[in-house]
Image (tube, rainbow, N blue to C red):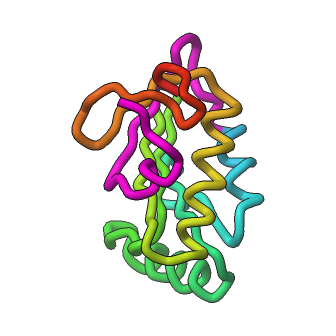
Amino acid sequence: MSLSMDTLVRQEQVRFTPKAGVFDVDRIAAAIAGMGSSYRDEADPSKFVLTSDDESRDEFQARRRADPSSRFPFMPLVTATPGEVTVSPIANHPDLRALSIQFLEWLTTTYDCRLEEETGADAVAPDGSEGA
C-alpha cells in the first residue's frame, strides 16, 4: 500500500521503526523544538506535543506540571524512543496539519525507517520507497 503525506496525517497513529541502528531522541527533540511552539513533555520526556502557538503551549505545559498524570491535549503528539517513533498527527486544523506534515517529512527524510500505519500494515513511504 502506498501512503501519501496527505494519507499519513489522516491516520490516528503511525509507527516508525529504524531499518538499522536506532533513532537519536535528542536529535528528534532538537528538530521538534524548531517547529512552531512545540515542546518536550517534562513529566514524560519521550512525549512531544506539536503546537503552533505560545499560548496553547503555555496552557498545556501548566496543566501537565500541575497534574503530570493528566491527559495530553488534542494536538499532534510524537512519542520517541531509540527503537520507535509513533506519531498521532492531526489533519483537521490547518496549522496542526502543517506541523504534522513538517515533522513527518523531517523524520522520513532524516531516517531510513519502516512505516506501519494504524491498522498495523507495513506501508510504503510518501516518496514511494518501501517502508519510509
The range drawn in magenta is 1-25
Q: Residue furthest left?
A: 119
Q: Which residue is painted at 45% across and 81% down in the image? A: 63
Q: x and y percent of residue 71 in the render? A: 32, 70
Q: Quadrant of the N terminus?
A: top left
**In front here: 39 or 74?**
74
Q: Is residue 11 left or right of residue 60?
A: left
96 shown above or below 123? below
Q: Please name the residue shown 68% across and 82% down the image.
A: 54
Q: Is residue 107 magenta?
A: no
Q: Nearer the viewer, residue 77 or 69?
A: 77
In percent of the image, x 47 and y 23: which residue is there?
131
User: In this orientation, which residue lies closer to the viewer: 37 or 70?
Assistant: 37
**Viewed as shown, does residue 109 lie left or right of 112?**
right
Residue 115: x %, y % from top left: 43, 30
Q: Does 74 appear above or below 9?
A: below
> Residue 102: horizontal and vertical position, in percent?
66, 54
| Residue occupying image coordinates x 32% and y 67% | 69
Examine the rendered structure and indicate whether residue 115 appears above or below residue 50: above
> Farthest residue toward the top?
20
Quadrant of the image occupied by residue 36: bottom right
Q: Is residue 3 inside the magenta stretch? A: yes
The total of numbered circles placed on residues is: 0
Q: Main secondary structure of the magenta part?
A: loop
